Amino acid sequence: MTDTKTYTLIDGRKVATEIKQEIRLKVAERKLAGKKIPHLAFILVGDDGASQTYVDNKVKACKEAGFHYTMMRFADTISEEKLSKHITHVNNDEDVDGFIVQLPLPPHISVERITDKIRPDKDVDGFTNRNFGSIISKVPLLMPATPFGVMELLRRYDIKTEGKHCVVVGASRIAGAPLSMMLVEQGRATVTICNKYTENLEQYTRNADILLVAVGKPGLITAEMVKEGAVVIDIGTTKVDDPSKPNGFSIKGDVDFKSVAPKTSFITPVPGGVGPMTIASLLLNTLRATELRHP
Ligand code: GUN
């Protein structure tokens, strides 16, 4: 007998397109009403190919949404002090509603100190401590963008988290840690957080109703590690050399999609899953930052 079970591919591109369309309409309404158009600024340090591609995609999304944008590029030799001064300048620029510092930064610059310099109400990536705390706050400001995008994907695919066992692999400040808090606070889920020190990872992943992976190790999650019928969300984005691609690389997730997908009920692909949602969240946060400053 052949196995006819199928899984649903979670189409992040489609959902992100819907959200961007909703944003575009709101921007058009603001324009008609003579209100300020959202202005998003990008700070890019060095010439890392993957970062350039990510920022290009974000700029394209800004244009499509009708936002204003500014691109600021710096050589990877820039000192932390100089970069900090530029951040202070953007913090004080009345026209900029939100900005991001694309990561990674060169090793001589502290991501933590730089992130800490960003004004929380312009921190549209949601990286600052204030916005991290916002997840459990009664007065939310700007949600961390990647987890916000994941939660929105689950909502739009009607995947219930309440009472479910969510296993988050990876505890980074950008993804795993805030996502775990959101699943508990907004999703009312039971959450297990695994990190790089976790022993017998598969013992946890196999018990997940919803498995969310944000590590940056292509192929980490294989079929034996996943429960039959689980939902699998792949947040990994690793740049891998690929001579067949015009830019010489492709982006790989943490899940061995081919072997894992047939065991799942829902799964995100990479690319085309969580990645586009991060951009949609960035635009949503920028619109919110603009609305807060210019109601
Ligand atoms: N590098 C990888 N992902 C991200 C992101 O979401 N925001 C920023 N600023 N840098 C990144």
Image (spheres, grey):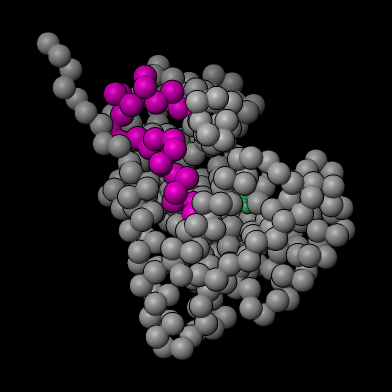
At 51% from the left edge and 23% from the top edge, which residue is drawn?
220
State the quadrant of the N terminus: top left
Residue 208 in percent (x, y) is at 40, 31
Q: Which residue of the protein is positioned furthest toward the front in this rendering? A: 246
Task: Work out whether 277 lies above or below 235.
Answer: below
At 49% from the left edge and 39% from the top edge, which residue is drawn?
235
Asked if the stretch drawn in magenta spans residue 216, the answer is: no
Viewer-closest of 32 and 279: 32
6 vs 141, left or right, is: left
Asked if the stretch drawn in magenta spans residue 267, the answer is: yes
At 30% from the left edge and 24% from the top edge, which residue is drawn?
263
Whether residue 138 is visible here, answered yes or no, is no
Task: Work out whether 277 lies above or below 169.
Answer: below
At 52% from the left edge and 82% from the top edge, which residue is drawn?
36
Q: Which residue of the protein is positioned furthest toward the bottom in this rendering? A: 34
Which stretch is magenta? 254-279
Residue 17 in percent (x, y) is at 36, 56
